Amino acid sequence: MANIPITIPLLNPVRFFREDVGDFFYNFQKEWEYKANYCQKYQFGDTPVIQILTPFYQDYQSPDNEMDLVNSLGVVVSTHTFECLMAAYGGFLIVMAAPIESTLTEGIYYYRARLRGNSGPINFWSEPMYLKATHDDTVLIEYGHDLNDFDCIFKGTNETPPVPLFQIRVEGGLKQDGFVPGGKYTLFQDQDLSPVMLQGVPVNVYRFTLGNNRGIPNYMADKINRLFSLSNTFIDGLAYMRNEGAKLEPIERDPLYPLCSWVMDLALKENKYSDEYDPTDIPNYNYETNYSYEYS
């Protein structure tokens, strides 16, 4: 067989490295830097989809191609088999989509992808993930695309199951001061310099903070920047797009500290001019309870 590499797309929600070749982010930090650890956050029920391109698609259901969830003691707590989209895409793509079980104990876990190689199984390890029922300081970003691109499969066919959205959970969210009303306006001034509005379209900008006071590593910022290059991005269920010309900007960087928080200007994918309600959907409110307000 030709020497076709195993390819792990950078759009995957977790970072992987090859055992005995790469290492965890923590171990790559310079000795003269502050050693800061980082665990990605996931809640029970989240589904961090993983896509991997491999030449050994014929045996994609063999024990050489499986994904283990391993706890901090090195014990395998669950194993997931791969789904192969070989009929439509030549057999080089493997998708794993399995919700994180609510029966797990809160703690730190890792993914271990066991993939077949020319001389036997090859292990790939993820960065550590902190799994629990709720992470209140996080947002869930789901992302997909209208085309198959970036070494990923985003669209299924009649021969394949639907391709689920990627999911990544990251600290941060929309702060109160992150709301910026704006828009695009074309004005004209007459001879008396009186302004005349020729065209105006109001557009609100939402400046999201990604990361908390400890920050996130560069590989997480890289993934967030990449996913906002796609056509479909959802933050906690709402569809956002990168605002025109927007980029990830660091809030504050310390040259001796390897983590940083970032901000990015986003806009809602649909610039609505109205709030719409279903007239047949009449809630049964207790107005005294739900709309009372005490002034101080």
Image (tube, rainbow, N blue to C red):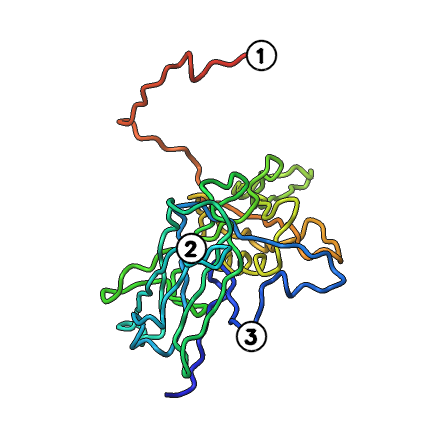
**Whether residue 200 can be seen here:** no
Residue 237 percent across, percent down from the top left: 42, 44
Could you tell me how far apart the alpha carbons at marks 1 and 3 are, in whole angstroms?
63 Å
Neighbour class for label 3 at 10 Å: few (<14), some, many (≥20)?
few
* Among the 4 quarters of the image, the one containing residue 115: bottom left
Q: Residue 253 versus residue 154: which sits nearer the camera? A: 253
Q: Which mark is residue 135?
A: none
Residue 182 percent across, percent down from the top left: 58, 41
Circles 1 and 2: CB atoms closer than 8 Å: no
Neighbour class for label 2 at 10 Å: few (<14), some, many (≥20)?
many
Q: Residue 262 versus residue 80: which sits nearer the camera? A: 80
Mark 3 or mark 2: which is in front? 3
View extreme (left): residue:
158
Looking at numbered disc 3 in the image, what kind of residue is underneath it? Val
44 over 68 or under it: above or below: above
Q: Is residue 92 left or right of residue 261?
A: left
Q: How many numbered callouts?
A: 3
Quarter that holds the C terminus = top right
Looking at numbered disc 2 in the image, what kind of residue is underneath it? Pro
205 over 142 or under it: above or below: above
Residue linked to disc 3: 21
293 over 254 or under it: above or below: above
Q: Earlier in the sequence, mark 1 or mark 3?
A: 3
* Residue visible at 36% across and 61% down in the picture: 96
Quarter that holds the N terminus = bottom left
Mark 1 or mark 2: which is in front? 2
Looking at numbered disc 1 in the image, what kind of residue is underneath it? Tyr
Residue linked to disc 2: 48
Residue linked to disc 1: 295
